[in-house]
Image (cartoon, rainbow, N blue to C red):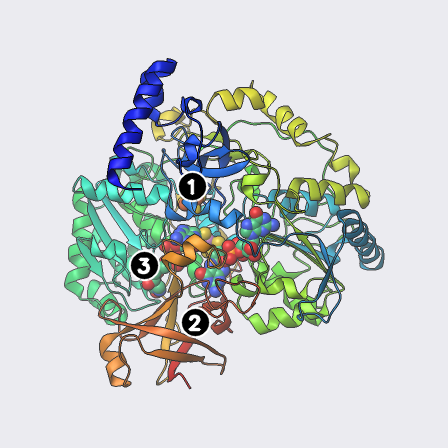
């Protein structure tokens, strides 16, 4: 539309607003009062009919910002960040804006399907929901009779996963439920926090950004990691002149804003953290009061780091001793308003729980806990569960989702949940680890080997099996061995081709879900309600779970008539209901206890000693280092680079590459390589190469980004590309897949997390 048209329209709009009495309010919001116009197809969307507003929680990534959805004539036209939501604060990231395009993706799964061809062939026949659910129920019951409920594994991720990986799995009685957001993401930081402070970090990193003076980002690449809130926080800190310290082998977006960039040799962060603690203690710039009041084991720590000098760490990390000392002093200058942010995707090298303990210990050495501008305490919102009979097996599947059970995750081994036939997680995949919820990638092997017992069935809800789980070939082999594989998804991802039965879910804009109740500085409850009817023959996950539950004898776990009754029942425990929640703007915010002063002299720490445990007896008892040690990781073989990966601001994992509006913005990933290293190999910026890893697995071609922004020993790509299903019309063959090249991983002995950065690639010209 030409500029002049815009002006005229605006003037007419204001005049009409005044004439209808809608006046200033309508003009100010740019909405409302629109009925005064006869709509034409050229009118802006907000003049084409009455605008309906619904409240929702964005599901374009697992961060789950609160959103307001505007619909005209049964079509979603615009999504805004909910100003009442503590995460959105009225804003959205580009992926959140992409939600409309995600919902309208013509490649979506549209009807339930039963496999007619071989596994992997992708041949299906459409069936009715009745037929699909009856068939699944029949096969599930067979598995239960033959081998017990543990022979079913349930995977789940994203906002609807509670119905499956938590509720359905526990009601059915399998301890083999898992989420990719734990052992492939946050579990090292959660387990390290539990061992050090007595409680996990939880879904929301408790950093009091508003009063922070210095932020230290280790890996954590806010900027590429486009979580709305974190982008706002970092921009705000930078805008008011706060100090930024970034440790990353790559000159990340955050590094471009940093006062100190430490281009560390990959896999050596624990050495840096120990040396930083050495400087704090040797130069006596640590927080004596905090150490005396709130910690145990400081003497052992001081002794442990006495010889971990900056010179010692310089050799290991490839940083200069001077830079290590200077950055430590810069942190001390603003401490305790200096925080090393607990990263989110922290499963890197297999020794990650120890690295995360070192991160927490340095925060504590600075005294950066429990006061303004420090780490704070999160509180779970008060909200009753729907009253149900006891589960067949207790123990949530973990992950970074914000379900209230998160606090129960990760018991010490031996306290793990029993299945009804007495088989436990300890009898299964988890026995090698000291703590943590079940590691998803460890449930794949029993599908093939039958050890320690065979997993025969899999329900896979919103988990991208062939993009999110390392050892793709092994996963494919396992899927072929299953007696029953049910996939509940919205898109024809590669794993769908192996499913016996495919159930198409309605997207988040088309469905209700359980309430989103987040442990936070200001604990809160948020609503997801449908903006439009489900498209095609799709159904909400809650409905599918209830229908299936009723068919397999679990009706007592699904006693609600419908989802509104379920939600109203829960909301009544906080004096609310759906109408009230809507009238409050979709969010109920409660009061938290973020600082020490809120605990009135009681210790907020829930370790056995009631203090922060710098020296950890529980680790020592289990033969693990009670204070973190630096352990070297394997070096790249001659001619190979370490394969690093991360996020792109307009994409989420492997799920948005096919979303038309987001694919437009960044259609294919690139391989970052140091410009000198590329030249030595005879490659230049823009060349297309094929990658081969240490096990001979190849992927690509992928375009080179030759740059000085990365060290010589590593290459980097954005995760989630290289889709192989032609039914994904936008994403098919675009770029390369990090996951396929991760044919190896390093297991964390404490929590069972899979370190993915132990893979190496070499480059070959495209044939
Ligand atoms: N746009 C977008 N944002 C997202 C997501 C998304 O899919 N898309 N996903 C969300 C989720 S669930 C998660 S878990 C987070 C993940 O985001 P983060 O927690 O920030 O992810 P990391 O993998 O820790 O960080 C990747 C960075 O680590 C650097 N790195 C690699 N190896 C090393 C090393 O040995 N040492 C150090 N110090 N740095 C290293 C890489 O160069 C890269 O810059 O992002 C969240 N935000
Ligand atoms: N190689 C590699 N692996 C990784 C990572 C990595 O960076 N590289 N990152 C790790 C991290 S940090 C995380 S948190 C995990 C993320 O792991 P996933 O959550 O598995 O990642 P996505 O690719 O987002 O896959 C989401 C799946 O849900 C489907 N889906 C989307 N919306 C809906 C919906 O509304 N309903 C249903 N039923 N399905 C839906 C998508 O089509 C897709 O199949 O991956 C981990 N694994
Ligand atoms: S960070 Fe972006 S994609 Fe993630 S929930 Fe928020 S708006 Fe949605
Ligand atoms: Mo994650």
The one of 574 and 339 positioned closer to us in this rendering = 574
Within 10 Å of disc 1 (Cα), the crowding (few <14, some 14-19, many 20+) is some
Q: Could you say where residue 167 lies in the image, as x and y percent from the top left?
A: 66, 42
Q: How many marks?
A: 3
Q: Residue sitting at 41 percent across and 40 percent down?
A: 611
- Which residue appears at 78% of the width and 35% of the height? 556
- Residue at numbered disc 2: 758
- SS for tag 2? loop
The disc placed on residue 304 is 3
Whether residue 444 is visible here, answered yes or no, is yes
Q: In this view, does 271 lie to the left or right of 243?
A: right
Q: Nearer the N terminus, badge 2 or badge 3?
A: 3
Dot 1 falls on a residue whose secondary structure is: loop
Q: State the CA–CA distance, disc 2 to disc 1.
A: 28 Å
* Residue 467, horizontal then vertical, whole percent: 52, 64
The N terminus: image quadrant: top left
| SS state under label 3 | helix
């Amino acid at each position: 539309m030409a500029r002049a048209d815009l002006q005229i329209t605006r003037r007419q709009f204001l005049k009409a607003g005044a004439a209808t009495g809608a006046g200033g309010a309508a003009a100010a919001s740019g909405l409302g009062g629109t009925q005064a116009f006869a709509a034409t197809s050229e009118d802006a969307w907000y003049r084409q009919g009455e605008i309906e507003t619904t409240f929702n929680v964005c599901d374009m990534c697992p961060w789950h910002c609160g959103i307001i959805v505007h619909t005209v004539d049964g079509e979603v036209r615009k999504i805004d960040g909910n100003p009442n939501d503590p995460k959105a604060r009225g804003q959205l990231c580009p992926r959140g804006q992409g939600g409309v395009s995600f919902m309208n993706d013509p490649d979506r799964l549209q009807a339930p399907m039963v496999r007619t061809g071989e596994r992997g062939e992708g041949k299906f026949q459409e069936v009715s929901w009745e037929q699909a659910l009856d068939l699944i129920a029949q096969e599930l019951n067979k598995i239960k009779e033959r081998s017990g409920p543990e022979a079913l594994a349930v995977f789940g991720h994203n906002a609807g996963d509670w119905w499956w990986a938590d509720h359905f799995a526990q009601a059915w009685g399998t301890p083999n439920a898992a989420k990719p957001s734990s052992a492939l993401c946050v579990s090292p930081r959660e387990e390290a926090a539990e061992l050090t402070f007595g409680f996990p970090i939880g879904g929301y990193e408790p950093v009091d950004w508003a009063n922070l003076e210095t932020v230290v980002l280790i890996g954590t690449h806010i900027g590429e990691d486009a979580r709305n809130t974190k982008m706002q926080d970092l921009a705000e800190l930078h805008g008011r002149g706060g100090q930024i310290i970034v440790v990353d082998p790559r000159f990340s977006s955050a590094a471009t804003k940093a006062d100190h960039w430490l281009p560390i040799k990959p896999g050596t962060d624990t050495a840096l953290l120990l040396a930083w603690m050495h400087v704090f203690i040797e130069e006596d710039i640590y927080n004596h009061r905090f150490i005396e009041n709130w910690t145990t084991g400081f003497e052992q720590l001081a002794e442990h780091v006495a010889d971990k000098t900056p010179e010692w760490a310089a050799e290991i990390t490839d940083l200069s001793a001077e830079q290590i000392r200077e950055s430590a002093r810069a942190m001390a200058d603003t401490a305790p308003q200096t925080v090393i942010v607990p990263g989110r995707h922290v499963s890197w090298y297999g020794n990650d729980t120890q690295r995360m303990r070192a991160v927490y210990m340095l925060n504590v050495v600075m005294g950066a806990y429990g006061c303004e501008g420090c780490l704070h305490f999160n509180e779970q919102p008060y909200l009753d569960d729907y009253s149900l009979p006891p589960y067949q097996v207790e123990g949530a599947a973990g992950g970074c989702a914000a379900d209230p059970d998160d606090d129960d995750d990760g018991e010490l081994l031996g306290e793990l949940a029993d299945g009804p036939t007495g088989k436990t997680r300890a009898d299964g995949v988890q026995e090698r680890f000291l703590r943590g919820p079940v590691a998803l990638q460890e449930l794949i092997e029993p599908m093939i080997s039958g050890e320690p017992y065979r997993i025969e069935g899999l329900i896979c809800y919103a988990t991208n099996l062939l993009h999110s789980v390392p050892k793709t070939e092994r996963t494919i082999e396992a899927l072929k061995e299953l007696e029953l594989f049910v996939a509940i998804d919205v898109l024809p991802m590669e794993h769908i081709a192996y499913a016996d039965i495919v159930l198409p879910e309605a997207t988040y804009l088309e469905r209700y879900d359980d309430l989103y109740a987040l442990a936070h500085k200001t604990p809160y409850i948020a609503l997801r309600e449908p903006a439009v009817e489900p498209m095609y023959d799709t159904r909400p996950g809650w409905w599918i779970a209830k229908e299936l539950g009723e068919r397999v004898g679990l009706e007592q776990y699904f006693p609600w008539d419908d989802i509104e009754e379920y939600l109203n029942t829960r909301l009544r425990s906080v004096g609310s209901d759906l109408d009230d929640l809507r009238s409050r703007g979709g969010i109920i915010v409660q009061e938290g206890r973020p600082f020490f002063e809120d605990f009135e002299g009681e210790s907020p720490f829930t370790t056995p000693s009631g203090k922060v445990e710098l020296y950890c007896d529980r680790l020592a008892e289990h033969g693990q280092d009670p204070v973190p040690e630096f352990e070297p990781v394997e070096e790249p073989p001659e001619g190979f680079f370490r394969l690093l990966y991360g996020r792109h601001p307009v994409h989420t994992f492997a799920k948005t590459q096919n979303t038309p509006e987001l694919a437009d913005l960044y259609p294919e990933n690139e391989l970052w390589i140091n410009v000198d290293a590329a030249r030595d190999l005879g490659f230049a910026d823009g060349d297309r190469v094929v990658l081969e890893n240490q096990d001979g697995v190849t992927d690509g071609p992928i375009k080179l980004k030759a740059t000085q922004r990365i060290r010589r020993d590593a290459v980097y790509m954005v995760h989630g590309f290289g889709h192989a299903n032609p039914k994904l019309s936008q994403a098919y063959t675009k770029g390369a897949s990090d996951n396929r090249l991760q044919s190896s991983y390093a297991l964390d002995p404490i929590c069972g997390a899979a370190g993915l950065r132990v893979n190496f690639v070499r480059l070959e010209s495209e044939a």
